[in-house]
Amino acid sequence: MPERRATQPGDSAQLCLSCGLCCDGSLFARGEIERASAETWQRRGLDCAESDGRAFFLQRCACLDGTACSLFATGRPAICERFRCVPLRELEAGQKSLERSRETIERAVRLRGEVRSASHAAGVSFRNFLHLKDELAAAFVTRADGSDHDAIAGALVALARFNAFAEAELLPDDEGDQLSKL
Ligand code: SF4
Ligand code: SF4
């Protein structure tokens, strides 16, 4: 039975400010913007690029300040205004309390931390999780002497745990390809 409750003002902001997963490269590698507006967004601080005639800003987003968006007051890309992860949707629909939604986000944030720590321990740097698996695999091959192989394997396991949790608990099915998923 869904847990119905009235959403309180500020609940959504509280949840998002404890998170930042949809901005920091954990869930997405890029978000689509209008080609005509790419220069403007670049001037406003986003790191923009084109691919196959489409324009994107890259993640980890250059406008993320801690867990807050530095463009929030002056206007974000439409895709950012629109995106809602599953826990946020459930919160706003009154299907889950702030506490229950926060439990899901806290678990995801813990798993994100494990990926970051394990990757740093393996000496692999990354901009987002989308390409991290390839970077870890490449490091495994190039360190032929076996150095760091245990650390790299640990990072791959942590990444697989995070990705499985994100697919099951965070990512909605209806975002199309404007946001590149895991
Ligand atoms: S992943 Fe969800 S809770 Fe986290 S910042 Fe994005 S929309 Fe908010
Ligand atoms: S512009 Fe703001 S909301 Fe959009 S990805 Fe960057 S930090 Fe997040």
Image: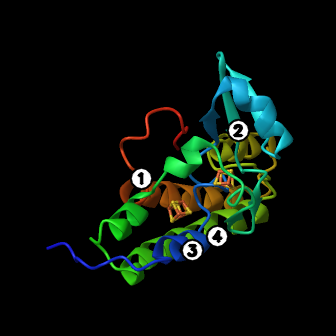
Mark 4 to mark 1 CA distance (whole Å):
17 Å
Q: Earlier in the sequence, mark 3 or mark 2?
A: 2
Mark 3 to mark 1 CA distance (whole Å):
16 Å
- Dot 1: element: helix
x then y, percent, for residue 22: 58, 55
Circle 1 crowding by C-alpha within 10 Å: few under 14, some 14–19, many from 20: some
- 168 or 11: which is nearer to us? 11
Residue located beneath label 4 in the image: 113
Q: Amino acid at mark 1?
A: Glu
Q: Amino acid at mark 4?
A: Gly
* Left or right: residue 111 compared with residue 23: left
x then y, percent, for residue 38: 74, 30
Say which quarter of the image contains residue 79. top right
Which of discs 2 and 4 lies nearer the camera? The answer is 2
Residue located beneath label 2 in the image: 57
Circle 2 crowding by C-alpha within 10 Å: few under 14, some 14–19, many from 20: many
Say which quarter of the image contains residue 20. bottom right
- Dot 2: element: strand
The reply to whether callout 4 and callout 3 are in contact (CB within 8 Å) is yes
Does the closest atom of ligand 2 sit within 8 Å of the Cβ of label 2? yes
